[in-house]
Amino acid sequence: MKNVSVPRFGNRTILIAIVAVVLFFLLYSFSSQFFYFFERVEEQEVGVKFRSGRISEIVGPGVYSDVGLFVRLERVSSEAVPFRVTDEELITLDKQRIGLVVTGDVFRPGVAHVETIRTKWAQYNQHYLNDEVARAAIEDRARQAMKVCVGDRIFDDAVIGTARDELRACIDTELDELASSYGLNVDNVAVPDVILLEEAQDRLDEIVQSRLQTEKAKQDELRAKAEAAAEQARQEGAIRVEQSRIQEEARQQKALAELDKEKIEAQKAVIEAERANELARVEAQRAIIEAEKANELLAATRELEIQQARALAAAEQAKADLAEEIALAELYTNNPAFLQREIAQANASALRETDKVIFTPEGVAPTLVIPGPGIVPTVDTAAAGNATATVTEPNGDEAVTTE
């Protein structure tokens, strides 16, 4: 079997290694005062940054680094630190001994209380960094507050009924004032238990029994008053119900009357509307009749005008037709000689070759008549010595000749 050689280190080597490790830790401890990297401040913490032994900045949650002379980052937790205090030697104002149990939560200043941290850090930094230190300080102040609040009250006002709530409020107020001197805040203060000695318990039982009887008497009195008030309220309610019914009936009757009135008004309005419509229809018919009459009158007027125009036209036509005759009449009237000439010319024009003419002097009647068919002897005399002969033609026409 082969021998395995184990390397051996001398004492000098071990000593050098130990010295190196010690120097490393010393160097690290010394150099760590000049930097820190990626130091994390949690959500429920507040970071206090130091430079040269003084607070340089107070920051909220995040990751921070710094390099400088004597730099460091301290973390202050803002979570609640619960406490519980028991004191069995509390003396009331009437010299009764009782005990109390008080519980609550302590809160350190947060980012919103930067000035509190700055001003109180030098004196109370351990209260901000160490939960036990903060708890011990508040427990001492809680005992002080318990003595103050219990010592200001008699036994009955400290432990019976709602007095415990008043006692709790007193301890809460007193303790909060005492804790504010540290820059701390106390909340959720409660008095879950009251510790009584045997004689104090007997007295408490007597007081409770007496108060129960008094309370029962008060409750009986209140019950009687309540029943009387309920009966009165019931009667008043019945009266109100009856009044309400009467008022409702009156209101309904009034409403019905108003509805009837509105109905009558509506009917009246309908009648008036129908009457207005009828009047409008009559007026429309009258307007139509008047329009028709006006149209007929207009037509008659137009017809009259037409007839008058026609009459004027006929008169003018008659005048035009008679103009020649009137002119001849006026000519004959104004010129008798011309008329005689025309007559003579007419007679001369009426003579034929077969006609028989007898000329006689004026004033002498003819004595010879030649009979013949259709011949009738006639004599016509005229003034101024003219001789006239009248011949009857066979066809019955007469021809007159004047000399």
Image (cartoon, rainbow, N blue to C red):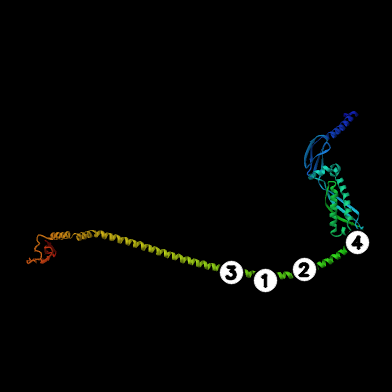
Q: Amino acid at mark 2?
A: Ala
- Neighbours of disc 2 within 10 Å: few (<14), some (14-19), many (20+): some
The tag earlier along the polypeptide, 2 or 4, is: 4
| Disc 1 target residue | 246
Identify the image quadrant of the C terminus: bottom left
Q: Nearer the viewer, residue 67 or 303?
A: 303
Q: How many marks?
A: 4
Q: Which residue is mark 4?
A: 203
> Type of residue at label 4?
Arg
Whichever of labels 1 and 3 marks the residue nearer the N terminus, that label is: 1
Residue at image mark 2: 229
Q: Secondary structure at mark 2?
A: helix
User: In the image, which is nearer the foreground, mark 1 or mark 3?
Assistant: 3
Residue 275: x, y in percent? Answer: 50, 68
> Residue at label 3?
261
Q: CA distance from mark 3 to mark 4?
A: 81 Å
Instruction: Give the mark nearer the N terminus: 3 vs 2.
Output: 2
- Disc 2 + disc 4, Cβ < 8 Å: no
**Residue found at the very far front of the displayed protein:** 384
For the residues carrying marks 3 and 2, which lies nearer the camera in this image? 3
- For marks 1 and 4, give the CA distance: 62 Å
How would you rate the neighbour count of disc 1 (Cα within 10 Å): few for under 14, some for 14-19, many for 20 or more? few
Relative depth, front residue between 123 and 33: 123
| Residue occupying the point 33% across, 61% down | 306
At a point 77% along the width and 39% down the height, the residue shown is: 63
State how far apart marks 3 and 2 are (Cα): 45 Å
Query: Between marks 2 and 4, how big is the CA–CA gap?
Result: 37 Å
Q: Kindly identify the amino acid type of the residue bearing the numbered disc 3.
A: Lys
The answer to which of marks 3 and 4 sits earlier in the sequence is 4
**Is 335 positioned to the left or the right of 60 in the image?**
left
